[in-house]
Amino acid sequence: MEKKPLLTVKNLKQHFPIKGGFLGRTVNHVKAVDDISFTIYEGETVSIVGESGCGKSTTGRAILRLDEPTSGEVYFQGENVLTLSNRKMRKLRKEMQIIFQDPYASLNPRQTVKQILEEALAIQKVVRKKERNDRVLDLLEKVGIAAYQADRYPHEFSGGQRQRIGIARALSVDPKLIICDEAVSALDVSIQAQVLNLLKSLQKEFKLTYLFISHDLGVVRHISDRIIVMYLGKIVETGDKHSIFENPQHPYTKALLSAIPVPDPERKKERIILKGDVPSPINPPSGCRFHTRCPFATDLCKTKEPVLTTEDHMKESHQAACHYINDFAGKIPAHN
Ligand code: SF4
């Protein structure tokens, strides 16, 4: 069966102006997201990974127009989200939900869980008033919260339970796409696994599509179909999960993979330590943006920007942006 695109992002840019000087003029821009394109198909989970400051969360916010993007196109079910009126956008937000890292910050502390969910149902007019109570209890059950807890306040729940409530709220409006922005990052490892499993089973039941945003490749391994690796506002590698984990091409992806802990103490893994911090997105490095930290950088890397390409030893859907993909093939150990 042919895959149907749900979300297509084309040449998306998000440059935040920096005001300065006496007159408060724009003196520069933070190039948080700088010309990225990708497609997410119905029913799949695509993860965006990268260190803090790579532009992954900004991408999620730009798709939902929580911050208006500088330029580009975002098609959701064939319609350009960025040209919709506010009224149409409000309607569309029902289809595209977001779950944040800290659900506590987005749950009203003065409302019980039941009130929070009922409010979401009322705003989006999902069910009739008399059906709301049943719908709330049903949603809570789906995410593993007992009915007797519905009258409790957010502070009476653990971090993992609060994230479950955040998921229930996102689900309440029957979305098609859920953007999970570092949704499990603040949770303990065992709770992370439970929430990831919950997201997976809900995906099947409700035919959901996920855009999963995380700094941790180890976490996205469990949930992703495809992975996009971002560095300083650019996509540096993209491919299906197996390509990224078993045949990574970009030195940055290899460094991220080498940082994932291996549970077996007998197994030695070569760790690639990156020099320094991520450079400022105000004046990103010339040529390949990764050249200031790449252990393999040459003079060419400082002047010429590499584009996303697929070489013979890579799957058709696998792309990486590095001048030396062919030279590296097989030279740096992959994460197995
Ligand atoms: Fe490293 Fe050069 Fe490849 Fe960039 S293009 S990743 S600097 S080798």
Image (spheres, grey):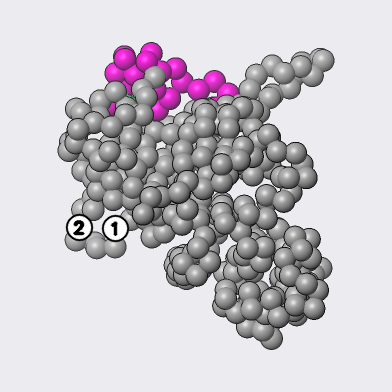
Image-quadrant location for residue 276 = top left
Report helix, strand or loop for mark 1: loop
Q: Is residue 94 covered in magenta? A: no
Front residue (pair 180, 108): 180
Which residue does the numbered mark 2 point to in the structure image? 267
Q: Separation of disc 2 and disc 1 at Cα?
A: 7 Å
Q: Residue at x 78, y 45 (%)?
A: 87
Crowd tier of the residue under label 1, counting other residues whose Cα lies within 10 Å: few below 14, some 14–19, many 20 or above: few
Badge 2 residue CB within 8 Å of ligand 1? no
Image-quadrant location for residue 124 = bottom right
Residue 130 visible in the displayed image: yes
Q: Residue at x 79, y 19 (%)?
A: 24
Q: Is residue 301 above or below residue 58?
A: above
Rendered location of residue 123, percent (x, y): 78, 61
Which residue does the numbered mark 1 point to in the structure image? 262
Residue 99 visible in the displayed image: no
Quadrant for ligand 1? top left
Instruction: Name which residue type carries label 2.
Output: Arg
Bounds of the magenta segment: 281-304
Crowd tier of the residue under label 2, counting other residues whose Cα lies within 10 Å: few below 14, some 14–19, many 20 or above: few
Image-quadrant location for residue 311 = top left
The mark that comes first in sequence, 2 or 1, is 1
**Horizontal side, residue 235 vs residue 297: left or right:** right
Q: Residue at x 34, y 19 (%)?
A: 301
Rendered location of residue 34, percent (x, y): 53, 27
Q: Residue at x 61, y 37 (%)?
A: 80
- Label for residue 95? none
Instruction: Name which residue type carries label 1.
Output: Val
Rendered location of residue 65, percent (x, y): 67, 40
Report helix, strand or loop for mark 2: loop
Q: Main secondary structure of the magenta part?
A: loop
